[in-house]
Image (cartoon, rainbow, N blue to C red):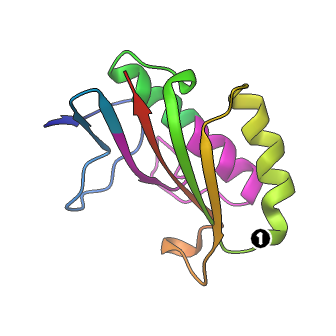
């Protein structure tokens, strides 16, 4: 098992990695949207989705992959009414064939974020 590290995304000092490479699979921990310079939360679901997907692209690049290598994506939303905005940003970053995906409404996320995304990619 190999831990993914990156200077290109913000990382909290918490007991979990940005991601793990295990064999031909890459597991990315749930990402929320923080300003990469300050670590402050970004506001608004569109801006948060944009930041998270950009971070996912950067993390995958650390191990020689792209979003075209994503196999599955799980999206956690505080308000399922935001799914249209999320889908619009998602379609700007990913292309067909899209990875398998789930979107789940949750009652709360850390630091009052609107969205969190985790993903799995394959080499």
Location of residue 105 in the rendering, given as x and y in whole percent from the top left corner: 66, 74
Location of residue 99 in the rendering, given as x and y in whole percent from the top left corner: 60, 37
Above or below, 103 against 54 in this view is below
Residue ID at (40%, 44%): 10
Q: How many marks?
A: 1
Is residue 48 within the magenta segment? Answer: yes
Name the quadrant of the N terminus: top left
Above or below, 89 against 112 in this view is above
Horizontal relation, residue 96 to residue 34: left or right: right
Horizontal relation, residue 88 to residue 58: left or right: right
Horizontal relation, residue 9 to residue 115: left or right: left
Location of residue 25 in the rendering, given as x and y in whole percent from the top left corner: 32, 33
Horizontal relation, residue 100 to residue 38: left or right: right
Which is nearer the eye, 35 or 113? 113
What residue span does the magenta drawing correspond to? 27-53
Name the quadrant of the C terminus: top left
Above or below, 43 against 55 in this view is below
Is residue 50 within the magenta segment? Answer: yes
Residue ID at (47%, 45%): 119
The image quadrant that residue 7 belongs to is top left
The image quadrant that residue 14 belongs to is bottom left
Residue ID at (42%, 20%): 61
Q: Residues within 10 Å of mark 1 (few under 14, many from 20)?
A: some
The furthest residue to the left = 1
Secondary structure of residue under mark 1: helix
Residue ID at (40%, 28%): 122
Location of residue 81 in the rendering, given as x and y in whole percent from the top left corner: 84, 70
> Residue tagged by mark 1?
80
The furthest residue to the top = 64
């Amino acid at each position: 098992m190999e831990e993914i590290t990156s200077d290109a995304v913000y990382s909290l000092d918490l007991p979990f990695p940005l991601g793990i490479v295990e064999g031909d699979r890459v597991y990315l921990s749930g990402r929320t949207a923080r300003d990469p310079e300050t670590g402050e939360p970004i506001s608004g679901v569109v801006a948060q989705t944009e930041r998270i997907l950009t971070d996912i692209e950067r993390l995958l690049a650390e191990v020689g992959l792209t979003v075209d290598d994503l196999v599955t994506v799980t999206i956690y939303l505080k308000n399922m009414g935001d799914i249209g905005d999320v889908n619009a940003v998602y379609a700007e970053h990913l292309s067909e064939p899209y990875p398998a995906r789930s979107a789940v409404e949750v009652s709360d996320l850390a630091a009052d974020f609107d969205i969190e995304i985790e993903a799995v990619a394959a080499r």
